[in-house]
Image (spheres, grey):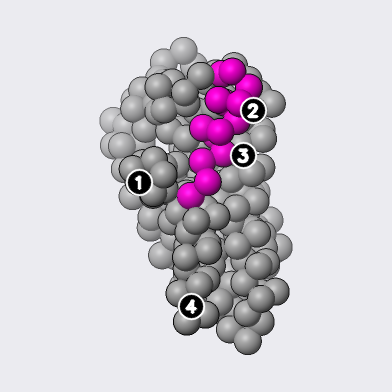
Amino acid sequence: MAIFLLIGAGYLLGSIPFGVILTRLFGAGDLRQIGSGNIGATNVLRTGRKGLAAGTLILDGAKGAVAVLLARHFFPGLGPDGAMIAGAAAMIGHCYPVWLRFRGGKGVATLLGLSFALAWPIGLVFAAAWLGTVLLVRISSLGGMVGAVSAPAAALALGYPTYAIGLAALAVIVLWRHRENIARLRAGAEPRIGSKKGGGEESGTT
């Protein structure tokens, strides 16, 4: 019963579309009709509202972190498994929110937040890999994917086998959500940050 509660609560928390909510509240329009239509921070940035994009990034990350922390607080007996399940449910909720007909974000920010909550060194490796890649090649989607893949590797190296398995499964979801970005990367057509090219379908990363 506790597992079902964790999954349900984590999913509902993760499915809160903060990008859509913030852009509507502050008069930036319907995010689903802007740019790629993605609900993450990258697409919010296309509205020209950097503050809203930053808020979306933080809140999307917080969804994953809060799910993990609530699981530890209310179901401490479940240990690492409970925390991982709750965080995973939150990320799946972000990617496939029931409120938006299961059309959500790509999960990078939420995965980063839950990684920090699971074990801060894992989150630190994730963040460093994400930001380092973006700074090096100026491709947002590639940075998100590299960060996501680095999380299970970091968890395994740091001695968190349960987290490594769960994070590996979530990294696969992130890669799947970026499948169109991967196709553009292979074709050399993925836009770089600051380039006027792009803004097409699925070009966001969070």
Q: Is residue 115 magenta?
A: no
Q: Is residue 129 visible?
A: no
Q: CA distance from mark 1 to mark 3?
A: 19 Å
Q: CA distance from mark 1 to mark 2?
A: 23 Å
Circle 4: element type: helix
- Disc 4 marks a residue whose amino acid type is Ile
- Disc 1 marks a residue whose amino acid type is Phe
N-term mark: 1 or 4: 4
Q: Quadrant of residue 179?
A: top left
N-term mark: 2 or 3: 2
Q: Badge 3: few (under 14), some or many (20 or more) residues near its Cα, within 10 Å?
A: many
- Residue depicted at x 67% and y 63%: 117
Which residue carries the number 2 mark?
52
Q: Badge 2: few (under 14), some or many (20 or more) residues near its Cα, within 10 Å?
A: many
In the image: residue 54, left or right of residue 146:
right
Residue closer to the observer: 119 or 138:
119
N-term mark: 1 or 3: 3
Q: Which residues are magenta?
A: 15-28
Which residue carries the number 4 mark?
3
Q: Badge 1: few (under 14), some or many (20 or more) residues near its Cα, within 10 Å?
A: some
- Disc 3 marks a residue whose amino acid type is Leu
Image location (x, y in percent) of residue 138 = 54, 29
Q: Is residue 89 above or below residue 183?
A: below
Which residue carries the number 1 mark?
102
Residue closer to the observer: 157 or 113:
113
Circle 1: element type: loop
